[in-house]
Amino acid sequence: MPTINQLAKLSRKKKHHKSRVKSLSQCPFKRGVCLKVFTVKPKKPNSAIRKVAKVLLSNKKRITISIPGIGHKLQEHSLVLVRGGRANDLPGVHYKAVRGKLDFNSYETFERSNRRSKYGVAKKK
C-alpha cells in the first residue's frame, strides 16, 4: 500500500487490459467471407458435432468462427457478420456469426415458442 507522499510523487498506474478479440480490431462487428464451412468435435467431457467456418475478414485476417443455433445454409463465399464471443468447448474459436445479417439468415424452418426475440420469430396466435 503506497503512502500519501509516494502517491504525490507518482500517481497510480492504469491497468492495461488485453483484447480477447484482436482480429476485430476494436470494432464490435466485422464482415467476412466464408472460405470453408465444416464440423469439429468439442473438447473432452462434451460430445457433439459443432458447426464452424473459416472466415476471411474485411481487414484481411483469417479466423475460425462458431455457427450458432439450429441449422444453417452457409457455404463457401457466403457473407457473414462476425462478433466476439468464444465457443467454450472448441479450442481456438473466439468469434461467432451473427444470425439474420447478410447471407446468414435467421431461422426459416425452425419454430420457437419461448425466447423468440433473440431469433426474430413472431408470436404464434
Image (spheres, rainbow, N blue to C red):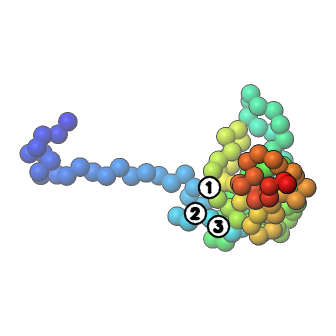
> Left or right: 99 with respect to 83?
right
Question: Callout 1: few (<14), some (14-19), or many (20+) C-alpha neighbours within 10 Å?
Answer: many
Look at the numbered discs 2 and 1 and tell me whether their residues touch, using CB distance below 8 Å: yes
Residue situated in front as seen by the camera: 52 or 103: 103
Residue identified by numbered label 3:
30
> Where is residue 49 shown, x and y percent of the image?
84, 41
Look at the numbered discs 2 and 3 and tell me whether their residues touch, using CB distance below 8 Å: no
Q: CA distance from mark 2 to mark 3?
A: 7 Å
The residue depicted at 71 percent of the width and 42 percent of the height is 90
Residue identified by numbered label 1:
84
Q: CA distance from mark 3 to mark 1?
A: 10 Å
Q: Amino acid at mark 2?
A: Pro
> Where is residue 7 shown, x and y percent of the image?
15, 47
The residue depicted at 76 percent of the width and 70 percent of the height is 102
Q: CA distance from mark 2 to mark 1?
A: 7 Å
Query: Is label 3 in a helix, a strand or a loop?
Result: strand
> Where is residue 11 shown, x and y percent of the image?
19, 52
Q: Say which mark, if any, is on residue 34.
A: none
> Where is residue 105 shown, x and y percent of the image?
82, 63
Q: Is residue 43 visible?
A: yes
Question: Callout 3: few (<14), some (14-19), or many (20+) C-alpha neighbours within 10 Å?
Answer: some
Q: Amino acid at mark 1?
A: Gly
Task: Give the mark nearer the N terminus: 2 vs 1.
Answer: 2
Residue identified by numbered label 2:
28
Query: Is label 1 in a helix, a strand or a loop?
Result: strand
Task: Give the mark nearer the N terminus: 3 vs 1.
Answer: 3
